[in-house]
Each structure stands twice: as C-alpha cells, then as structure tokens.
Image: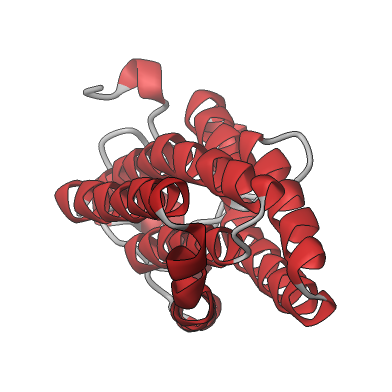
Amino acid sequence: GEASLAGALGTTRGVDVAVRFALLISPADASFFATPLLVLGALTALGCGARALSTRDLRELAAALAGAAGGLCFVALASMTPQGLQGALGLVLARALAGMLVGLCVAALVDRLGEGSVDRAGGVARQAPLLAGALLLGLLSLSLLPGGAGFWGALLAVLGALGRAPAWALITGALLVLQILAGARLVRLLGPEPHAGWKTAPALLAPGGVVPDLRKGRE
C-alpha cells in the first residue's frame, strides 16, 4: 500500500514539473493542456472522493483520500496561473507528507485491531492518544482543513481557478468540499468512546481490549 502511494505521489510531482517546464518554454502550447488537466483532475478527485465516502475499509479510505488530493493537484495546475501553480506545489508537498503519515497511522491501527472496518474503529483518542494525534496531524493537511499545510495550497488553487474562469473556481470549490467530507470519516476514528467490540476482539485479548499506543507497540 505504501509503495503504491509513493508511486502515485511521484507521478503527481512529475506532472507538476512537466507543466512548469512547458509554461517556461511555450506558454501558448502549454495552455492547450489546461482543459484536459482539469477534466482528468476533476474526474480523479470525484471518483476517489466518492470511493472515500462509500468504502467501509480503513485502508481503502486512506488511499482514496490521497488519490482525491492528487486530483486536486491537477485541477490547480490546470488554471495555468501563478496562484494555481503555487497551490499545486503546496498540495503536492502536503499530499506527500500527510498521505504517508495517514497511511502509516491507519496501517498501525488496522494491525492492532486485526481488522480494517470503519464502523468498528472509533474511539482511538482515549486509548491511544499518540496514534490519534499523529493521525489528526496528517488528516488536517490531507483533508485540506484550516490549520493544516494543505489548506494554503487549496486556497491558492481556488484563487488561481478564479483568475482563469469563475466556473473553474466553482468546480475547484466543490471538489474541496468533497475532500473535507471524505476526511471527516477518518476524523470519526478520534471519537471519545471506543467501540464495544474491542473488549472481545481476538487481536486485543492480550492487551485487555485496549488499543496499544505507539510507544507500546512495535513502532
């Protein structure tokens, strides 16, 4: 999972660099790819966002959330404006760091619970505050919420799209809302009450039905 995510992150960064070079060499020719980039990015963000909202598997949810952020990087690039290009760079960097962090935290949680069900994974903050804190730090950026590094990239992406065309800004804003809603599903993991099934979960019998925190695990 982490290897696939790393490959996707590299691809997004590669497209970002290619668009910047194309704009330096021939801005008129580079603008030809603006609409295809917008369509590709919007479809990617929409598809991954819908998957993140519908899946019941934690690992699929984390991967889909990172994929949706990659689609937003393409949407930001498509504006071909200074704000959009800087926003895309911010989104690429935030996605790279936050995507890896969220993926590792989710993998650690699934390893401790012995399963990856979204419905049975709430209440991590009370029993494993370090794991919950690391997950929240990554989610702030990956979900593009204020307070996270990805928020500034998202804001520049909207401003860049507005400079290109109001309709593009509307599309970008709608995709950002979808990203926030998808990220909210993972925020539920930090709820105050642990799932009642943890007390009898086979993977948690040894620690007495309590999710081991990072300092008590194998990390």
Camera-nearest residue between 94 and 157: 157
Q: Which quarter of the picture shows residue 206? A: top left
- Residue 143 vertical position relative to residue 43 in the rendered view, above or below: above
Horizontal and vertical percent position of residue 153: 65, 44
Horizontal and vertical percent position of residue 18: 33, 52
Camera-nearest residue between 192 and 161: 161
Horizontal and vertical percent position of residue 66: 43, 57
Q: Residue at x 28, y 24 (%)?
A: 217
The answer to whether residue 52 is visible is no
Looking at the rendering, in which quadrant would you find the C terminus? top left
Horizontal and vertical percent position of residue 47: 46, 83
Q: Is residue 172 left or right of residue 170?
A: left
Q: Residue at x 76, y 69 (%)?
A: 173
Camera-nearest residue between 58 and 34: 34
Q: Residue at x 20, y 54 (%)?
A: 1
- Residue 28 vertical position relative to residue 138 in the rendered view, above or below: below
The answer to whether residue 148 is visible is yes
Q: Is residue 27 left or right of residue 176?
A: left
